[in-house]
Amino acid sequence: MNHLLEINNLDVKFDTDEGRITAIDNVSLTLDQGKVLGIVGESGSGKSVTAKSIMQLNPGNTIYNDDAKIIIDDENVLKFTSKNDLKKIRGGKVSMIFQEPMASFAPAIKIGHQMVEQLMLHKPLDKKKAKHISIDMLNRVGIADAEKRFNQYAFELSGGMRQRAMIAMALSTMPKLLLADEPTTALDVTIQAQVINLMKDIIKEFNMGVIFITHDLGVIAQVADDVAVMYLGSVVERGPVNEILKNPKHPYTRGLLNALPDINNLDAPLKPIPGNIPSPLDRPTGCVFRTRCPDPTHECKEGSIEMGLVEVSPGHWVDQCCINCG
Amino acid sequence: MSENILSVNNLSVSFDYQENFLSKKQKIKAVNNINIKIKKGSFFGLVGESGSGKTTLGRAILGANKISEGNVIFHDDERDFDLTSITSKEMKEYRKKAQLIFQDPYAALSPRMTVRDIIAEPLEVMKITKSREETDEKVREIASKCRLNLEHLRRFPHAFSGGQRQRISIARALVSNPKFIVADESVAALDVSIQADILNLLKKLQEELNLTYLFISHDLSVVAHVCDIVAVMYLGHIVEMAPSRELFSNPRHSYTKALLSSIPSIDPENKSKAIELKGEIPSAMNPPSGCVFRTRCPNPTHDCKEGHIEMGLIEVSPNHWVDQCCVNCG
């Protein structure tokens, strides 16, 4: 079976005043229908840039490498340039939910109008039909009084409600692939639990593929089937969620897990990963993690080992440099 | 000498609200009848969802919000400061003793001042130091305590990462040698690894400088780790308060239970369902009568559904206080 989404050898660079910055370095990922791929990593690790590349939403100074491929339905969407083609990936086959639901809605246009507008752009529907679908969608994401909410503005809704409306809007075009960029980060825990349950139900019902970006490993554990851990633009470890969280092989993944306060073990000390994430302007050569590795080998300190994932157990891939590090 | 550093007695804070200039003025009670005592040298945690009044309470304690009812008393070594009857001269004195660390290290630091000037500003404004040399010495001393590189003092904030900026904010709060610190969501904007680093730093400074913290956060696992005693707020009320181990192992209020069960577990096999609270926190403009939690309580008794039961904390086991309405709910 073909994968729903295939990212091959993606490099992303940004041209800035201070020089050319490598944001993504040789990332390859796959996602199947009905599955949730979680991407975790600290800020600046390239999680969002990866997702935005799929919809070509990165800014104008972005440079993609020539042999990079992002394949959806046998088409390399990275080569899309015409308006009609781009429409297919921006809201057609692919939808995106952003972190800050307040910033994602236009403040002076009614929510219903925004939903109907984008729906009519992507589907051959008249206004009445589009409205019907939108209200139905609002109902399905658990918004009470959908008819009334349809005619309200974003500021009249609470944070959790806005994120639900955002999800309803993203799903109304029936995308095959949903990109969720930190969808629960700005929400309180009780609302986060509601939104996560809602998303799980919807993923099952629509049989979509989802890329779920977050820095919260707890959220990943609850929603994802597979996980990719990113550090400084590279995927350093990926595999099934159980395997990654219970049997992490990369020192960075272990570091993230150790830094997490565990409510079931209050005596465990909090262990930060030593050092700071390097500036993308002076990216380490060789293994990107070597400047913070707790126990680097001689060769990797020198930076002479190339990055590259190797399979350590079925489906579990780890960067070759760090398999044997502390 | 009292063993408490701060006593909050029956504190309420209300704001005036007017829908438009023709309508009647309303009062919104953001913080309602709060009683807490904070022991010297403790790490006091305050948790709750957005809109529960955590920040308003913290600001009222620092004298940044007007107190509508009740009082706040700060017990210093020689004397007490009563914030309801404080003079502006005393207020200046109080500001040296009680300081605030903000949430967002990107917004809290002026981009046009060097790190040295940012940290030195409180000393100059409060006229603590007499000469430039003395100021520099104090700045260097606190900067090294906060593990800032002294060569970085001449740089501007844009050159620093989130974690380093938060350390600069902490150094600035501590430079006037305060005794009491309100840390308002001070690690919420940071990555987990940096968060662990900052929490360890706060703990270390507490021992070295003999500090007392009021730590405001919405993240229960963070609070569980660092705080000695925790108060849970909901809609302007404290609904449960206990030593943190007791609270997290034996929560009594259904709101605390729901909050705890909502923390996503790190174990993928443990997909235990959160106790889902229906709906959202009601607006403070028209709070429910009686028990404020009754509109979302998973298992309310008949009396509390009707709103007949008054709010008030009772002690269920030593130092474990729960709202009387909800002791038997859930």
Image (cartoon, coloured by chain):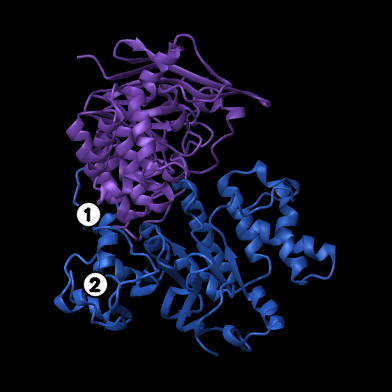
Please tell me the colour of chain A.
purple
Secondary element at tag 2: loop
Taking the spot 46% from the left edge, 36% from the top edge, the residue there is A295
Same chain assignment for discs 2 and 1:
yes
Secondary element at tag 1: loop
Q: Amino acid at mark 1?
A: Ala
Q: Which quarter shows the N terminus of chain B?
A: bottom right
Q: Which quarter shows the C terminus of chain B?
A: bottom left
Q: Is residue B276 left or right of residue A22?
A: left
Q: Chain of mark 1?
A: B
Q: Is residue A248 visible?
A: no
Q: Which mark is residue B16?
A: none
Q: CA distance from mark 2 to mark 1?
A: 16 Å
Q: Is residue B311 visible?
A: yes
Read off the residue under disc 2.
B252
Read off the residue under disc 1.
B274
Image spot of residue B195 (x, y percent): 48, 51
Q: Amino acid at mark 2?
A: Arg
Please tell me the colour of chain B.
blue
